[in-house]
Image (cartoon, rainbow, N blue to C red):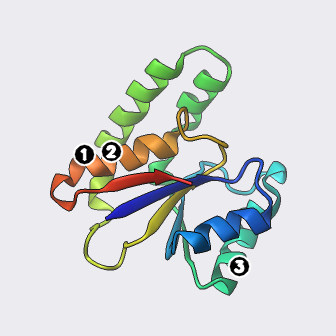
Amino acid sequence: MKVYTIGFTKKSAREFFALLKKHSVKKILDIRLNNCSQLAGFSKGADLEYFCEICGIGYEHNTRLSPTKSILDDYKKKRIGWPEYEEQFLKLLSERKVEELFNFGDGNNDVVCFLCSEEKADQCHRRLVAEYFKCKNPKLDIEIVHI
């Protein structure tokens, strides 16, 4: 099964939704800590939920899959580097037991896409979340696709 990730930065609404449609995404899991920033444009939480509804895509905002404000601030203010951020965030996911949130492969979470703001996934927590679920579900042969 495929699990997708997407960031909205440097994408127009047209490009963003075209990518979701192209990959047959059925549900967006918004894993941003703050999904109502003025900088979010079309991807502000309530607006994005409405646009997804129009497109027939489910939407859920889940901060259990977000970093804490402290971890995020430490990284943004360069008090920690990416390796430390990654280590702290993965520890947080484990402590929160987020693998219990979803039952991938039951048909209800098929074609899911983790959403965050970063343009690229290499240094974004959405990649870490997708990899965490892949690691916790080895029997499902999850393929992660960053769109």
Q: Is residue 118 above or below residue 138?
A: above
Give how far apart the Cα atoms at labels 3 and 1 are: 32 Å
Mark 3 in CB contact with mark 2 (< 8 angstroms): no
Task: Quickly name the residue at label 3.
Answer: 50
**Residue 94, horizontal then vertical, whole percent:** 29, 41
Residue at figure coordinates x 70%, y 63% from the top left: 16
**Residue 48, horizontal then vertical, whole percent:** 70, 69
**Which amino acid, mark 2?**
Tyr
Q: Is residue 50 above or below residue 115?
A: below
**Which amino acid, mark 3?**
Tyr
**Residue 119, horizontal then vertical, whole percent:** 67, 43
- Quadrant (top left, top right, bottom left, bottom right) of the C terminus: bottom right
State left or right for residue 79 relative to residue 43.
left
Residue furthest top as drawn: 79
Give how far apart the Cα atoms at labels 3 and 2 are: 29 Å
The local crowd at label 2, few if under 14, some if 14 to 19, many if 20 or more residues have their Cα within 10 Å, is some
The local crowd at label 3, few if under 14, some if 14 to 19, many if 20 or more residues have their Cα within 10 Å, is some
Q: Secondary structure at mark 1?
A: helix
Give how far apart the Cα atoms at labels 2 and 1 are: 5 Å
The tag earlier along the polypeptide, 3 or 2, is 3
Q: Quadrant of residue 106?
A: bottom left
Residue at figure coordinates x 50%, y 62% from the top left: 113
Specify whether residue 141 is in view.
yes
Q: Which mark is residue 135?
A: 1
Residue at figure coordinates x 37%, y 62% from the top left: 2
**Which amino acid, mark 1?**
Cys
Q: Which mark is residue 132?
A: 2
**Residue 47, horizontal then vertical, whole percent:** 75, 71
The tag earlier along the polypeptide, 3 or 1, is 3
